[in-house]
């Protein structure tokens, strides 16, 4: 009995070591840096100061946080609206088609995300694929300026993040016991009621992990705004990069990152509250 | 001047690893001072560690150097000047023999004691340098660096689609250009042109002047179609924008692809940058570094390099070797030399000024959407 326990602990050592070295320590390091002072040319001086955090709360930076959150929330909602039904119906296909769909979902990952994003430029640019189609069907008369707009960035975000939502919802739906739906129907629930009270509840962990995988990265995906938004939408990610590089203010960049992480955590808490589930499909 | 999105992604990770700069790579630095005095023969079989952006030297030149000296070149590249500085801080000026980077970062590296003083007696081609690009702020006494190309952002426009005349920065504000202008994403350059239109310096530390320029910059927002640092020329060539304010390498690429485009030397005054080559203070193979500087400043070799990178030639002797189809692009026109003399390099400014610049820039970017 005891031996078994020791073995169990030994087995955990690699994952703990990994987590401590690559997750915990860098985070602690970042938090420490965020309280230090910027050095004259490069790096930072070990002088404690809370000023970096005071600066984060200047309206200028708060406003940028707000913009980033807005874009993250809107993209997450869109991803849920498209990804949930997709994952749901995919989970209900027969095995052969499930495998085919899975394949189709995976193929885009064979190339770099940046390259795929650049593909959207070809679609969106003036006189591009979309413009030509719209004009062919007589919907528009002259080329539109679709690229470098807010909607273009949204499309890029949704496109980039959608597979994560689909896959997490799918794995939840696949595991579901469909007998429960039948039981609900037998007991007099309508189709919609059965969906809301049984299916949705049971797939909530999948939805939640989809949200984690969508919302968290979307706060930092500033390069989508760079590529499809022509750098015209300012996200907190790009502000952090500018602070690191052009302004060489590493402590302030660290403070911004710490706040960003706190905000993300806060949002996930709120979401957990609303959805009433703490489970994450396939994540924890 | 070169800026890549991909690089940014890795940059955070690099910083996390190098930020403190506590690493001690001094072990290899002991033997160097003695090596510096060696003659050409003794270089055989050694390696030169070259650290710069991707694509800064044509393959032909790199191979030519190896052929001549039997020194192997180990080309390492960075995406951002700041990555380079972080790396040099970490190695305390060791590991690399030659670095080519932008002027402002070279100044910081010199300040931090990471750059070796050049022994010009070891560079027989030193006098080929065009003095026009020497004695600049980052190295006022020419003690540490040799210029390797100058970047002078210019306005380029397509006279077919732009129906108004452009002669200076001020014209970019014209309402005729609504939604038709592309600019690079360097706030010191862009805020700077607003400063210039008001008659101020690119390098002012006066916060009121910078604020004034920022207010003016906001009016430019409706004209901006996109902000892009990497390949603005493509958007000009494809017609996505009619006018663009861009870096020299992009200007030459655009004009090469479409000679109908017009390049404008803005009448308010040029703001430019010089790329400088230097030997780090603890370069492991300084002797090879000298041989390399000597080689790339040979007129014919230099001409090849400048054609390859598409930046303005900073080597006077090389000018005559630049081929005809490049001459009008990268040899600075004789009749406009005064523009360089009266032009400004973009220098490091106070933290407060820099921060205000950055804020105004982010605000401006939000306005463009």
Image (cartoon, coloured by chain):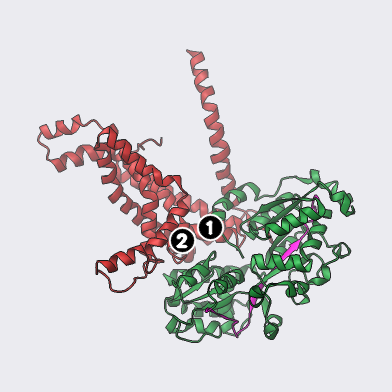
Chain colours: A red, B green
* Left or right: B296 in relation to A181: right
Q: Position of residue B132 (x, y in %)?
A: 75, 77
Q: Secondary structure at mark 1?
A: helix
Q: Between residue B347 and residue B326, name the one nearer to us.
A: B326
Rendered residue at 54%/75% (across/down): B245
Are the residues flagged by discs 1 and 2 in contact, CB closer than 8 Å?
yes
- Residue at disc 2, secondary structure: helix
For residue B331, which quarter of the picture?
bottom right
Q: Position of residue A131 (x, y in %)?
A: 33, 67
The residue located at (26%, 45%) in the rendering is: A85
Name the spot of residue A37 as percent of width and height, x first: 64, 57
Labelled disc at residue B334: none
Can residue B275 be found in the magenta stretch? Answer: yes
> Would you call the spot at circle 1 few (<14 residues within 10 Å), some (14-19), or many (20 or more)?
some
- Left or right side of A105 for B341: right
Depth check: give the residue in front, B159 or A147. Answer: B159
- The vertical placement of B46 against B166, above or below, is above
The residue singled out by tag 1 in the image is B5
Q: At 47% across and 12% down in the image, what residue appears?
A: A1
* Quadrant holding the N terminus of chain B: bottom right
- Please give left or right for residue A100 compared with residue B308 in the image: left
Q: How many labels, in total?
A: 2
Q: Tell me the chain of label 1.
A: B
Residue A44 visible here: no
Q: Is residue B213 above or below residue B120?
A: below
Q: Quadrant of residue B351?
A: bottom right
Residue B5 vertical placement versus B24 (above, below): below
| One can see residue A131 in this view | yes
Query: Residue B99, position in %: x, y?
Result: 72, 58
Q: Is residue B228 rendered magenta in the image?
A: no
Q: Which residue is mark 2?
A: A227
The stretch of residues the image draws in magenta is B260-285
């Amino acid at each position: 009995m005891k031996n078994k326990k020791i073995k169990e602990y030994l087995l955990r050592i690699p994952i703990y070591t990994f987590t401590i070295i690559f997750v915990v320590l860098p985070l602690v390091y970042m938090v420490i840096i965020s309280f230090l002072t910027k050095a004259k040319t490069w790096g930072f001086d070990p002088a404690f100061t809370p000023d970096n955090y005071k600066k984060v709360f200047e309206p200028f930076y708060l406003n940028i946080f707000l913009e980033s959150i807005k874009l993250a929330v809107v993209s997450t909602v869109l991803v849920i609206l498209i990804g949930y039904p997709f994952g749901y119906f995919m989970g209900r296909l027969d095995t052969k088609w499930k495998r085919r769909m899975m394949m189709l979902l995976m193929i885009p990952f064979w190339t770099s995300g940046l390259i795929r994003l650049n593909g959207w430029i070809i679609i969106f640019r003036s006189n591009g694929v979309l413009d030509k189609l719209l004009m062919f069907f007589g919907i528009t008369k002259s080329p539109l300026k679709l690229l470098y707009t807010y909607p273009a960035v949204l499309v890029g975000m949704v496109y980039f993040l959608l597979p994560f939502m689909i896959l997490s919802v799918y794995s939840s739906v696949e595991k579901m016991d469909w007998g429960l739906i039948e039981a609900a129907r037998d007991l007099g629930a309508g189709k919609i009621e059965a969906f809301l009270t049984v299916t949705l509840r049971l797939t909530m962990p999948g939805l939640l992990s989809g949200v984690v995988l969508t919302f968290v990265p979307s706060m930092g995906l500033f390069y989508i705004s760079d590529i499809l938004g022509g750098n015209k939408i300012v996200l907190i990610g790009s502000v952090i990069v500018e602070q690191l590089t052009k302004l060489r203010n590493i402590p302030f960049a660290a403070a911004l990152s710490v706040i960003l992480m706190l905000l993300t955590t806060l949002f996930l808490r709120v979401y957990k509250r609303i959805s009433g589930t703490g489970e994450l499909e396939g994540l924890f | 001047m070169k800026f890549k999105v991909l690089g940014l992604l890795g940059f955070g990770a690099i910083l996390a690893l190098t930020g403190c700069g506590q690493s001690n790579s001094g072990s290899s630095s002991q033997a160097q001072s003695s090596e510096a005095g060696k003659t050409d023969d003794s270089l055989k079989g050694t390696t030169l560690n070259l650290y710069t952006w991707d694509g800064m030297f044509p393959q032909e030149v790199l191979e030519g150097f190896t052929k001549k000296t039997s020194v192997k070149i180990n080309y390492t590249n960075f995406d951002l000047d700041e990555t380079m500085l972080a790396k040099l801080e970490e190695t305390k000026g060791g590991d690399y023999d030659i670095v080519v980077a932008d002027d402002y970062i070279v100044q910081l590296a010199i300040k931090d004691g990471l750059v070796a003083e050049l022994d010009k007696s070891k560079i027989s081609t030193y006098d080929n340098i065009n003095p026009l690009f020497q004695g600049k702020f980052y190295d006022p006494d020419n003690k540490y660096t040799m210029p390797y190309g100058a970047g002078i952002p210019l306005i380029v426009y397509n006279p077919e689609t732009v129906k108004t005349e452009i002669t200076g920065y001020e014209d970019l504000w014209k309402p005729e250009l609504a939604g038709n202008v592309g600019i690079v994403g360097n706030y010191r350059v862009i805020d700077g042109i607003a400063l210039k239109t008001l008659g101020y310096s690119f390098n002012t530390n006066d916060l009121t002047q910078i604020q004034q320029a920022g207010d003016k910059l906001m009016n430019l927002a409706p004209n901006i179609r996109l902000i892009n640092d990497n390949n603005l020329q493509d958007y000009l060539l494809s017609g996505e924008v009619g006018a663009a304010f861009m870096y020299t390498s992009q200007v030459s690429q655009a004009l090469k692809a479409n000679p109908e485009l017009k390049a404008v030397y803005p009448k308010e005054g040029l703001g430019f940058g010089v790329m400088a080559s230097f030997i780090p203070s603890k370069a492991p193979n300084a002797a090879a570094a000298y041989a390399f500087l000597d080689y790339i400043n040979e007129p014919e070799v230099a001409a090849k390099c400048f054609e390859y990178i598409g930046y303005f030639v900073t080597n006077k002797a090389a000018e005559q070797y630049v081929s005809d189809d490049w001459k009008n692009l990268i040899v600075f026109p004789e009749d406009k030399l005064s523009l360089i003399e009266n032009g400004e390099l973009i220098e490091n400014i106070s933290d407060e000024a820099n921060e205000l610049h950055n804020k105004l820039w982010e605000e401006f970017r939000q306005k463009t959407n």
